[in-house]
């Protein structure tokens, strides 16, 4: 008999009765599992947010714990006579550069030609171009023009000299030869080895319109001479360009902008992590206010580890508060950059050692090797965030619990389904029996009524 016909015969064993029984069993056996499953899923979702905050925190910690962050240098120039750039890890220093003469190029001009198309030779031959003691052979013929010679020189000797044609006035064109490099050794000469040039306009008639000179300047009063205005061999790690005559003061300091940016990021990520941990571990008698991990020792322990970290790191040579860090009563971290900058002005090497590890010089001038507070923090936080560490294990525990609960729910539901399938069949059989009994009873009543009526008629 189909379920839709349950109770037709008896009006007692109906589908409503089965549904009510099923709801009662669901409330007793299935709903507790569903509530537990919902709680575990909520924990898993909350843990993902906690994990993201902790990952951001460990990343910001490790960014400050690397020594290369403190190697960047900033070159500040007071004056306009030079520009300076500094490589990472260049010695911190200050010096004065007084430029008395810039290095110049050698520039020669030829005699006058009437046009760029004027030919230079009577027959084929070659000339020798010498610059800075280096010889270049330039081959020509009777069809070589002034413009063609310019192209030949640039093709053969372009690494050492630049050839151009300048129209000085109407009908006056001249070949200009300019040394690529500067300095007193850049003399330029042309000799005609074949004696087939038309005249000496390209040889002995070459005249210097600018003489190549060395740069003269002083470094902290010491006279220096260089052939170039770009100087990379004076101080290791410094690239100096002489720009004009005059005096400039140069300060090579630690580039703190990137350091401060990463300090700000650490403070921000710490506050975000500690705030989220405070929210999910909050204790309250009100269930709506109580944190989802309020009774979870793992998450509460992680929060305590972060809070204790401020007071425990430092390697015995200082505290975070001495470097401008502060934790308010409500657990919010802040940084006083004036204090930190003062520490960096006083001893940048100690700040680097205190933050990232290295040799720390104490007030009595003794030294000690320290791990660095951010490396200490990395160890503390890493115990939770590293691969297969506490958070991964807790996440795996939640995943396993959810899987187990889903399996329990499935098994329990299947058992109830089977039970109520049997009950439906039993109800149908009972309903048929009751219907038959009701029919028999009705027949007996009718027979009795008929007999009674006959007796009294």
Image (cartoon, grey):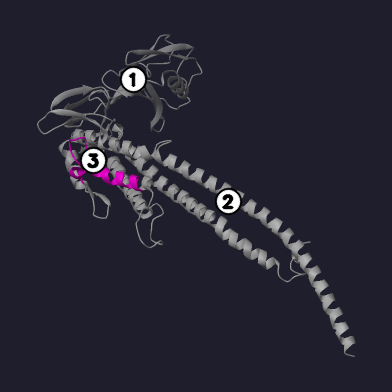
Q: Which residue is mark 2?
A: 409
Task: Using the rendered image of the protein, determine whether residue 81 is visible from the camera's viewpoint.
Answer: no
Q: Write the residue at 28% across / 36% down.
A: 376
Measure the alpha-carbon separation of dots 1 and 2.
Answer: 101 Å
Q: Secondary structure at mark 3?
A: helix
**For the residues bearing labels 3 and 1, Cβ distance under 8 angstroms:** no
**Residue contact at pointers 3 and 2, CB within 8 angstroms:** no
Image coordinates of residue 171 in percent, x first then y, are 41, 30
| Closest to the observer, 182 or 356 | 356
Element carrying mark 1: loop
Residue 258 placement (x, y as % from top left): 30, 40
Q: Can residue 301 be found in the magenta stretch?
A: yes
Q: Is residue 447 above or below residue 213?
A: below
Q: Which mark is first along the chain, 2 or 1?
A: 1
> Which residue is pictured at 49% across the width and 51% down the height?
41
Q: Quadrant of residue 432?
A: bottom right
The answer to whether residue 92 of the structure is visible from this angle is: yes
| Residue range corresponding to the magenta coloring | 300-324
Decide if residue 289 is on the left or right side of residue 41: left
Marks 3/2: CA distance? 47 Å
Q: First in sequence: mark 3 or mark 1?
A: 1
Quadrant of res 66: top left
Name the magenta segment's main secondary structure.
helix
Q: Which residue lies at the image location 40% right of the left edge and 27% below the top edge?
A: 164
Question: What kind of element bears circle 2?
Answer: helix
Residue 312 shows which numbered tag?
3
Q: Which residue is mark 1?
A: 206
Q: Earlier in the sequence, mark 3 or mark 2?
A: 3
Q: Nearer the viewer, residue 216 or 74?
A: 74
Question: Which quadrant is home to the C terminus?
Answer: bottom right
- Whole-Å distance between the Cαs marked 3 and 1? 79 Å
Q: Is residue 193 above or below residue 170?
A: above
């Amino acid at each position: 008999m189909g379920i839709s016909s349950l109770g037709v015969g008896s009006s007692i064993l109906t589908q409503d009765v089965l549904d009510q029984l099923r709801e009662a069993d669901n409330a007793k056996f299935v709903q507790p599992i569903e509530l537990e499953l919902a709680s575990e899923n909520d924990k898993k979702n909350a843990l993902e947010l906690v994990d993201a905050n902790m990952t951001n925190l460990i990343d910001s910690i490790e960014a400050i714990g690397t020594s290369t962050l403190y190697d960047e240098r900033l070159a500040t120039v007071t004056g306009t006579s030079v520009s300076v750039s500094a490589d990472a890890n260049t010695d911190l220093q200050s010096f004065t550069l007084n430029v008395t003469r810039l290095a110049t190029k050698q520039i020669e001009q030829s005699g006058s030609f009437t046009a760029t198309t004027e030919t230079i030779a009577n027959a084929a031959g070659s000339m020798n171009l010498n610059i800075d003691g280096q010889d270049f052979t330039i081959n020509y013929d009777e069809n070589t023009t002034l413009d063609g010679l310019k192209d030949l020189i640039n093709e053969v000797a372009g690494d050492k000299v630049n050839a151009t044609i300048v129209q000085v006035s109407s009908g006056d064109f001249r070949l200009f030869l300019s040394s690529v490099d500067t300095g007193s050794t850049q003399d330029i000469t042309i000799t005609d080895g074949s004696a087939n040039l038309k005249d000496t306009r390209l040889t002995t008639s070459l005249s210097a319109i600018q003489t190549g000179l060395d740069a003269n300047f002083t470094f902290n009063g010491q006279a220096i001479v260089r052939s170039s205005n770009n100087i990379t061999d004076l101080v290791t790690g410094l690239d100096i360009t002489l720009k004009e005559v005059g005096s400039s003061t140069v300060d090579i300091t630690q580039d703190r902008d990137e350091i401060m940016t990463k300090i700000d990021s650490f403070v921000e990520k710490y506050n975000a992590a500690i705030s989220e941990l405070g929210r999910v571990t909050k204790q309250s008698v009100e269930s709506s206010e109580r944190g989802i991990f309020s009774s979870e020792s793992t998450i509460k322990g992680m929060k305590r580890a972060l809070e204790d970290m401020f007071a425990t790191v430092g390697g015995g040579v200082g505290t975070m508060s001495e470097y401008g860090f502060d934790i308010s009563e409500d657990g919010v971290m802040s940084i006083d950059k004036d204090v930190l900058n003062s520490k960096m002005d006083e001893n940048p090497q100690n700040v680097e050692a205190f933050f990232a590890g290295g040799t720390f010089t104490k007030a009595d001038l003794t030294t000690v090797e320290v791990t660095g507070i951010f490396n200490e923090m990395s160890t503390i936080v890493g115990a939770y965030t590293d691969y297969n560490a506490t958070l991964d294990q807790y996440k795996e525990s939640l995943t396993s619990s959810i899987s187990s609960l889903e399996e329990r729910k499935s098994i329990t539901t299947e058992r109830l389904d089977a039970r109520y399938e049997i009950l439906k069949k039993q109800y149908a059989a009972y309903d048929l029996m009751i219907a038959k009994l009701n029919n028999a009873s009705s027949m007996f009543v009718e027979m009795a009524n008929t007999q009674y009526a006959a007796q009294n008629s």
